[in-house]
Structure formats: C-alpha cells, structure tokens
Image (tube, rainbow, N blue to C red):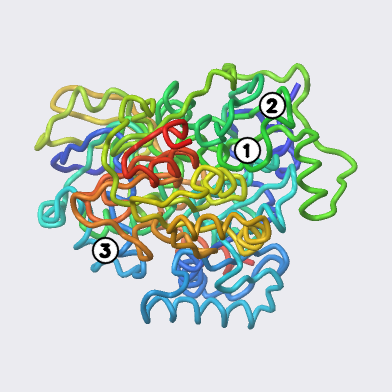
Amino acid sequence: MKTLTEKTLSRASGREVSPGDVVEVEVDLVAFHDLTGYHVLEVMEKVGVKRVFKPEGVVIAFDHLVPPPDVRSAEIQQAIRRFARELKLPNFHDVGYGILHQVLVEDYVLPGQVVIVADSHASTSGALGAFAQGMGASDVAAAAITGRTWLTVPQPFKVVLEGRPRQWITGKEVSLEMLKAFKADYFVGMSIEVFVEEPRAFPMDYRLTVANMGVEMNADALIFVPDEETSRYLEEMRGLRPSHLERPSPKAEYVDEYSINLEDVDFLVAAPNSVDNVKSVREVSGVEVDAVFIGSCTGGRLSDLEIAAKIMKGKRAKSRCIVVPASWRTFKKALELGYVQTLVEAGCMVTYGTCGPCIGGHFGVLGSGEVAVSTSNRNFVGRMGSPQSKVYLSGPAVAAATAVLGRIAEPGEVL
Amino acid sequence: MIVEGRVIKLGDKIDTDVIIPAKHLKSTDPEYLAQHVFEPIDPEFYKKARGAIIVAGKVFGMGSSREQAAIAIKAAGVKAVVAESFARIFYRNAINNGLPAIACPGITDEVKDGDLITVNVETGEVKVGDKVLKGKGVSGMALEILRVGGLIEYLKRSQRGL
C-alpha cells in the first residue's frame, strides 16, 4: 500500500520505510553546477578527500556564471574543470551545454531514482518520476564522496490534474494555481505526488515546470507519477524503453488529496515580492514593464519558446526582452523550428544555456525602480537585481504579450 | 546544549536572497559573508547580530540551496534560529554549519524584539520569561553533526574511521 515516495525510498534504503522515518539512502545521481560546485570542492578539500562514489554518478553542468562575467567566475570554472579531468568524470558539461536541471532530465535522470543536487531546483527531475532533492554544498560533497545521504521520509500528498488546459496555459500557470491555493508554507515536510488523468494533455515540458516550482511550494519533493507521457519523453529524447515504471500502489495512503481541473486554470502571475502572491493577469493588467525575461530552468523550454514565438510573430517588443533557452539542445530545436528567428525579428535578445538574469548576477540585471515580467521562479526582494526593482512571475504567453505591449497583458490583447 | 540570547525578530518567509544576495556567492569566507547578511533589508544587520537569537515566522530560509545563508548568519554571531517552521535545505545547512535551528510553532506570538530567551537545542524547549514553549529539538543524525560543530568535522571523523 505504498506511495511512490515510500517505494523509492524503501528501495534506496534497503528497508520498508514510512513517512517520518529518518533513513540513510543510496543515491543514484549527485549533481552540481559552477556556483555551488566550487563550494562542494572546497568542502571535499577541507575533509581531505578527493574521490567520488562512482565517476558516472556525478553530473556537472556550468550554468550560473555562464559565460563567465568576471575573472573570479572564470577561475571558479577552471577549478571545477580541473577536478572533473583529474577524477575522469564522464558527465561533465562545460559552458554552452545547458542549465543543470535541464541537462539532468535530457540526459541522465530515470524514474524511481534518488537524485541529490547542489541547487534547490533539483525538484525539476521529479517530473520524470525521480525523488530529487536540492541540498547545500556540504551535504552534496558528502553524497558525492559516499554515494549516500540521510533524509526524513516526507508525508505524501496527492494532486490530481483533470481534463485539458486551455490554449497557452502551461505548467507555470498550474504551479501558480497551486501556490494560490496552498501558499508557500503548506507543503513543508511533504512529498507531492501528481497524477495526470489525461497524460498526453499535460506534456513533459509542463510537468518539468510544475516539478521545478515544487521547491517554491516548499515541498520536500514533487513527483509526477510515471505514465505514457513519461515513456514517450524517454523514448524520444534518449531512445529508452524502460520495461517497468514504478507507480504508487492503487490503495496507497496520502495525508490529503487535491484536484485541479485544468480547464479552469487561468492566466496568473505571482506579484512582488512573493511566489504565493498570486493574482489573475486582469488584476495587474496595465502595470508598465521595463524588461521581460523568457528563460531559466522554469520557463526556458521548447514549449515556452514556441508559445512566445507564436504570440510575438510579426510584432515588435516594446519592453526590452531577453530569451534564454534552457539548453543547447532546446536552442538548436528552437532554431530549426524558426522560433529563434521570430523572436529575434521581434527584437528579443537570444542566447542559451545560462541561468542569466534569473539570479540577478549578470546578463540583464534590473535597476532600482524597474519592473520585470519573468518566466523564472522567484520574485524575492533583489532577486533579479536592485532591491528596489520588482518582478512579476508568469507563464510564457503572458510574458510574450507583455513584451509586445510594454505592460502586463493577456495574450488575447495582442492577437 | 543550551543557548541564551536577545531576540531579533523577523517575519514569515524570509528567503535566502534576502539573507545573502546571489552577488556574494562567489565567496565562502565567513567574515565576508557576515558583513553582507540580510543586506537587502538591513545593511547594518551584522552590527547588532552578535550573541542574538533570530526568531522568525514560517518557512525561514526558503529559496535557494546556498549554504552561505547559514554560514553568514552563524559568522555574524547569531547563536541560534528559532522559527515557526524551516525550509528543508536551510535547516540542513544550518545544522551542517553548527548553527542550531529549532522549529517552534507559536513562538512568534510569544516573543518580541529584544526579549531574552533560552533555548534547549536537544529538547526544543524555549523559555521566554516564565513561559516555556515546546519546539522540535535537534535529534538523531542532525544532533550528531551539530555536536561536532558541523558536517565537515563529522565527515573528517567518519572518513578517518573508514
């Protein structure tokens, strides 16, 4: 009668676990990027150990300081590059390959795995049915050395997605709907298991966005129960056909259950300065916007670019607009499909494979008093630049319409 | 393990970007980080933090996995954080850096800025005047890590044992 969370953690710990148990588990993948990676290596150095549990179990992708904006960033990357070479780590990806979470799902993560990442948006991999958690550098160093970590088995919570979303309603709107209903503190200590009633109506791109936002809900993990859409993605992306996909027992017990009718989900934004300050676009329509960002591990996938391109086709962006596909593969596909050309013709600045302005480090930080609409994940004070700037989080359709009109808008207003 | 200190009270949903902005993350130097702790909301925070206990609301430390958030608070001289609840990653980072973290539902109703409070890290009891609140003490693996001062020291010892 086990949930997917319990099944996964029972396998990984070698014993039957229940919610609340503190267990030691074997990890399948340990991952880090440049900005946390150098810290992971510092911890290893302080511990006096330079080895990993298995070279193919460690995934590295540079994304935060990409391309390096200053000497310190370049040197951080040099140190990690050296480390990867010395330990002969086969799954090391230098600048220009992709954002770590996107790289993980495109190339590595499998349903049922335990994945530990030195970055909070680790939750993204839950879209493939993995139990994925972000942790700090010390915890990740420990996991990389030993291949093990300890954790508390979370309380399982069931979410059911019913029906089909309306045109251009994506995983972003669904995650904002959940944050509107539950706020950012409700899921502390819980693992959200999401069941999709019509698997093909809610594709992997959307699932990745919802799972990514699981950490903004402060859930311990967010896992999509594997189904035919999971199989489709694994086959199309990697040519894999897993013989068995573990699912929760039909009588698995959850602490509670919540259903969302996808047809009822509307265009939403998270207004400043909190991810759970969710409003309908109509409530904030007309707010003037200086910058629009379409990108990140949350909102830089092919479906985001497709929607943005369709809305901006033949138009000109009024706000400055930065577009960053989440990986090289995503960028290349968007190039082949003509989305990049459309977006460039609309006046967008397009690059790829960097976290970019999402973390306020470089590539388009906000000045004081500026307002941005972003398909990324956080609108905390100062997140994307000045503490006096303001960020509205949205899905790709609202971001694209906003860029065209220079004020927050629904896509219907520009078509 | 008992800690005592004056309360610095903060609100709900204090996030890691507010604790230490991303622009400071290219360093792990505790002294540097301490000088920038809570910079977006109070650039002078570190001047009054030494010996204090932070009392905060829900999901303290939500947001990113940056371990510098816990390092900065600890290095600024804060003795412990007591909150209604914690974000999972911050809680682990705090323990891993020797900063006691106690989840104590109801604490924000009972405590005001400047109060002197006593926290029993293991039992989770928080004394405010003659009132005692029952929080969640640090136990198990987390307590073992906290006792030796953090995960690096814990790993050093366990690696020596291998």
Spatial distance from mark 3 to mark 1, Cα to Cα? 36 Å
Read off the residue under disc 3: B33
Chain bearing tag 1 is A
Read off the residue under disc 1: A207
Q: Amino acid at mark 1?
A: Arg
Q: Residue furthest front?
A: A314
Disc number at residue A224?
A: none
Whether label 2 touches label 1, CB < 8 Å? yes
Task: Tally the marks.
Answer: 3
- Residue A344 left/right relative to A364: right
Chain bearing tag 3 is B
The answer as to whether the residues below labels 3 and 1 share one chain is no
Chain bearing tag 2 is A
Q: Amino acid at mark 3?
A: Leu
Whether label 3 touches label 2, CB < 8 Å? no
Residue B3's quadrant in the figure? top left
Mark toward the viewer: 3 or 1: 1
Q: Position of residue A119 (x, y in %)?
A: 50, 54
Bin the neighbour count of mark 3 within 10 Å (Cα to Cα): few under 14, some 14-19, many 20 and up: many
Q: Secondary structure at mark 2?
A: strand
Q: Position of residue A363 (x, y in %)?
A: 38, 65
Q: Identify which residue, A43 or B138, lies in the foreground.
A: A43
Spatial distance from mark 3 to mark 2, Cα to Cα? 44 Å
The residue lying at 60 percent from left, 26 percent from top is A165
Can residue B93 be seen by looking at this rendering? no
Can residue A278 be seen by looking at this rendering? yes
Q: Position of residue A355 (x, y in %)?
A: 47, 59
Disc number at residue A196?
A: 2
Give the mark, 2 or 1, whose residue is nearer the N terminus: 2
